[in-house]
Image (cartoon, rainbow, N blue to C red):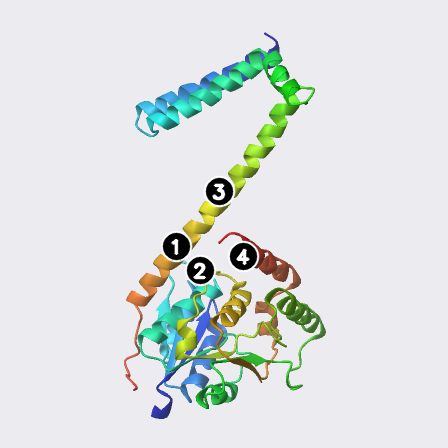
Amino acid sequence: MNAFQTIAILVILTLAFAVILAALRGWLERKELFTWLAISGAAAMAILWPNVTTKAARLLGISRGADLLLYAAVGLMAVGFLMTYTRLRKIRREMTLLVRHIALDEAEEPPFKVS
Amino acid sequence: MPSAESGVYVVVPAYNEESTIGAVVEDLRAAYANVLVVDDGATDGTHEVAKRAGAIVLRHVINRGQGAALQTGMRLALLRGAEYIVTFDADGQHRVEDIARLLEPIRAGQCDIALGSRFLSDESKVPAGRRLMLRCAVWFTRIVHRMPLTDAHNGLRAFSRRAAQRIDLKLDRMAHASELIDQIRASGLPFREVPVVVRYTPYSLQKGQRLRGAFRIVLHYLLGRVLR
């Protein structure tokens, strides 16, 4: 193992440990736990055996495994941003409706009543 | 108090306007009984000043933007049985006497929505920079909304009850002006532009939109159209 592999594996192990700990404390669903562990496992494999990703890349006509990972990461990140953005919009909208509801509930009438 | 105007509700969205809101509300109250200030989460004395001046005051506990504030105000006006709803800016740039000119064609049954336009009369001394920006906005309106307006971003507007019922602003911030135009077109209700005067003061200019803000608004509006 070279220096990069050692550091990267240590980081991944730490993260995996944190995820397991979170699951034990009930902060994560079982499904989420397995998803994160699968992602960590895949990352560890790609780091320990770079040839695996290179083979996958060649199948798609990309020469290097690292490039395949880069493209995949960019794509996933774009999807992630979009999902976060739509969720943020939804939360903003809900917040406005809530704020409006409170405002209408607590409308302050002047003491004079003209009509 | 003029009781004849009890069917008219003037909605004033206000965010940190303590220096102008008092005079604006007092001027409005001299002619219209129902002045409704929506304090959009102001951190200054806007709320107290508006209340002291005799307005019905609504408070957004968190700042939600002008579009959201307008919608909240219109909702309360409708709940209270408003026949006509007027929107009016809090910074003192509109004239109370223009409201009657907006209401006239609606009352006469000629239209349901009257939009104030500062470019239909030459009384408004629009600064050159502002004029250029607003002209661009008008072209944006003509191209994107296919609406032949001369002043798409004027806060002085009047609605009949049925028109107000069809307005539901979902873009909370400044892009609501464009959204409103879309909804007016979608409502199919007759509208017209009425000349009004916008008074430019150092205060209103400072509170108004600059170029950078304008780009942000266009972005919000376009994103809002794509991501329903």
Which residue type carries mark 3? Thr
CB under 8 Å between callouts 1 and 3?
A: no
Say whether residue B45 is visible.
no
Where is residue B217, by image quadrant? bottom right
Decide if residue B66 is on the left or right side of residue A63. left
Judge the density around disc 2: few (<14), some (14-19), many (≥20) Cα neighbours within 10 Å: many
Q: Numbered disc 4: what chain?
A: B
CB under 8 Å between callouts 1 and 2?
A: yes
Q: Nearer the viewer, mark 1 or mark 4?
A: 4
CB under 8 Å between callouts 4 and 3?
A: no
Vertical comparison of B74 with B214: above or below: below
Tell me the residue at 52%/43% (across/down): A82
CB under 8 Å between callouts 4 and 2?
A: no
Mark earlier in primary sequence (4, 2): 2
Q: Secondary structure at mark 3?
A: helix
Decide if residue A2 is on the left or right side of residue B83. right
Q: Secondary structure at mark 1?
A: helix
Say whether residue A109 is visible.
yes
**Most distant residue in the top direction:** A1
In x, y percent, where is residue A38?
45, 20
Q: Secondary structure at mark 4?
A: helix
Query: What residue is pinned by disc 3?
Result: A84
Q: Nearer the viewer, residue B40 or B70?
A: B70
In x, y percent, where is residue B173?
50, 61
Query: What residue is pinned by disc 1?
Result: A95
Which residue type carries mark 4? Arg
Tell me the number on the disc at residue B225.
4
Measured Cα–Cα span from mark 1 to mark 3? 16 Å
Query: What residue is pinned by disc 2?
Result: B64
Measured Cα–Cα span from mark 4 to mark 2? 19 Å
